[in-house]
Amino acid sequence: MYTEDELLPLSGLQHIAYCERQWALIHVEQIWSESADTVRGELFHRRVDTEGYTCAKGVRSDRSMRVVSFQLGLYGIADIVEYDAQTGEIIMPVEYKVGKPKQEDWDRLQLTAQAMSLEEMEGACIDAGALFYGETRRRETVRITEELRERVVLLAQRMHGLFSKGVTPPPPTNARCKRCSLVDDCVPFAQRDVHAYWAEHERALEVDK
């Protein structure tokens, strides 16, 4: 169990699943750069970020609900949490995303962590959530599987391990770098060239010995 002071942003799960270095630059070194994608995301979320609730077709939708898990050591905001308007039982969390569905599980992991937090907070059992994508204007139902839960636990532990040590991992230099809003702060390819330079010189020194 973690304390209030040890809680880390739940949204970091999406960052660390995408790239450990990106997560560390944001959450350890406090570096953030805007990109076209991040600006679009902020504008899109303004529609659902106002606290309150609405009721329609027997479902109460609570907006911008704070969620926390002391077991995972995470806190965050669920865009929408749906409840049965008659029984008050929780139905599912709904996360809004500006883009389109992804093959990777980055968004599903964030949604799973929200579901796990709500289970801890309300003593509920949540077996599904939903992702609403701005480009398709459709919901994607996500099954909260044991595999997703296990990955959330491992990633949360990894975040806390890196954060407690203040570690920023080296750049991976893969295709994701070009889409990263922090590519200019990270300069992954330049760092790769430096590492390659010293590796070559170390090999040369070994040959000369």
Image (tube, rainbow, N blue to C red):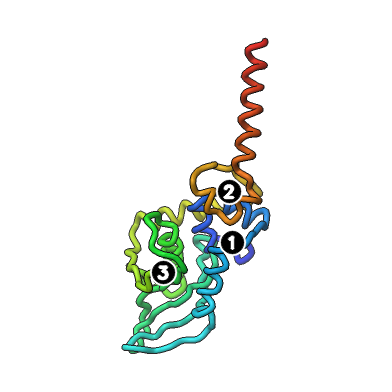
Picture residue at 48% right of the left edge, 75% below the top? 79
Specify the quadrant of the image occupied by residue 30: bottom right
Picture residue at 49% right of the left edge, 58% below the top? 14
Residue beneath label 1, please?
A: 35
Secondary structure at numbered mark 2: helix
The crowding category of the residue bearing disc 2, from other C-alpha atoms within 10 Å (few below 14, some 14 to 19, many at least 20), is: many
User: Percent from the top left, x then y, of residue 168?
Assistant: 63, 46
Residue beneath label 2, please?
A: 21
Relative to 145, does residue 117 appear above or below in the rendering? below
Q: Amino acid at mark 2?
A: Arg
Please report whichever mark, 1 or 3, sits nearer to the chain's N-terminal start.
1
Picture residue at 50% right of the left edge, 61% below the top? 71
Q: Amino acid at mark 3?
A: Glu
Specify the quadrant of the image occupied by residue 204: top right
Check if mark 3's residue and mark 2's residue have beta carbons within 8 Å.
no
Picture residue at 43% right of the left edge, 61% below the top? 107
Q: Which mark is residue 125?
A: none
User: Percent from the top left, x then y, of residue 129?
Assistant: 36, 69
Q: How far separated are the C-alphas under marks 1 and 3?
A: 18 Å
Secondary structure at numbered mark 3: loop
